[in-house]
Amino acid sequence: MQHAQGNLRGIALMVAAMALFGIEDMFLKWAAADLPIGQVVFVSGAFGAPVFALMAWRAGVPILTRAALHPAVLARNAGEMIGTFAYITALATVPLSTVSAVLQAMPLVVTLFAALFMGETVGWRRWIAICVGLAGVITVIRPGLDGFRPEALWVLVTVAGLALRDLASRAIPAEYSTAQVSAWGLMAVALLGLLMMGSGGAVLPDLGQTGVLLGALAFGTAGYWAVTGATRTGEVSVVAPFRYARLVFAILIGAFVFAEMPDTLTLLGAAMICGSGLYAFARERARRREALSTLSMGHGKG
């Protein structure tokens, strides 16, 4: 009973996190429309890095250490920088539903890269799910068709950057704390923003623009807290599929706030991406159950 209650609470937190992230995207889209992209990138990193640096300091682990130069950490930072820049650029130029739909392919792309570059075993069913999900991405972006927008390719760059970040995270030594790794990544994003501001300029935000930036930071921080709570409260295999609720919130916000109505191809592609992702989650959960069942039978024989 308590286990089921933990899963229900985890699901509720995950759905709440996706709603919060959807609202954060709304604020970021507003900010990117009025302010230089580099300035928004800088704010995204500069305000989050001190939070994780403080967490690391309270845990007694250093931030300024040679460990920050570990190749896996540097690769993760590069992915974080690429993903953040491309994501904010995409939000500024592409409908919110398109950005969110393609972003849902992230778990499939991570699995694809893990199979191609890290030797992870992927069964034929999950390969089919990956192919269907990538077909859904092509359906949303529709290269070569009338509705194709070149700016939508920024979403693909986002997915590639964040996939690099997630895969590099697996190679970071276990003794490096989450607070350290997060602080290094956000410091790298802030540095990228500074470099962009040096060449692209910056403006002093007015009261409204400041409120928009603070709104993005507040809802993004709350969403991060909620998604962390979700994965720590419920089983990951149970709560993770509810990440796709973000697409629902993105479509609603896009329609009612930005008057962006997704067309039939966008909805079809989104359904293909989400459906294949949910199937991949289900297959992974089934594989784990089979492995646990085999392990318990082996112990029973012993």
Image (spheres, grey):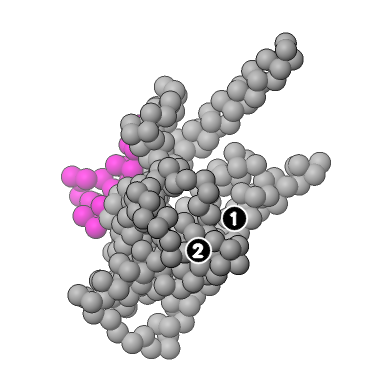
Q: Amino acid at mark 1?
A: Thr
| Res 296 quadrant in image | top right
In this view, the residue farthest toward the front is 66
Residue 62, which numbered label?
2
* Left or right of residue 199, residue 9 in this image: right
Q: Residues within 10 Å of mark 1 (few under 14, many from 20)?
A: some
Report the span colored magenta.
Answer: 131-153
Residue 81 at x, y = what percent? 33, 59
Residue 150, magenta (yes or no): yes
The residue singled out by tag 1 in the image is 228
Q: Dot 1 lies on which element? A: helix
Q: Judge by depth and name the residue closer to the eye, 42 or 70.
A: 70
Quarter of the picture containing the N terminus is top right
Q: Residue at x 50, y 63 (%)?
A: 62
Report the residue at 36% width, 65% height from top.
189
* Residue 92 sits above or below residue 266 on the image: below
* Labelled pair 2, 1 in contact (Cβ < 8 Å): no
Q: Main secondary structure of the magenta part?
A: helix
What's the CA distance linking mark 2 and mark 1? 23 Å
Residue 236: horizontal and vertical position, in percent? 60, 42
Q: Is residue 93 in view?
A: yes
The picture places residue 265, in percent across and down from the top left corner, at 34, 45
Residue situated in front as seen by the camera: 206 or 253:
206
Q: Upstream in the sequence, badge 2 or badge 1?
A: 2
Q: Nearer the viewer, mark 2 or mark 1?
A: 2
Q: Is residue 252 magenta?
A: no
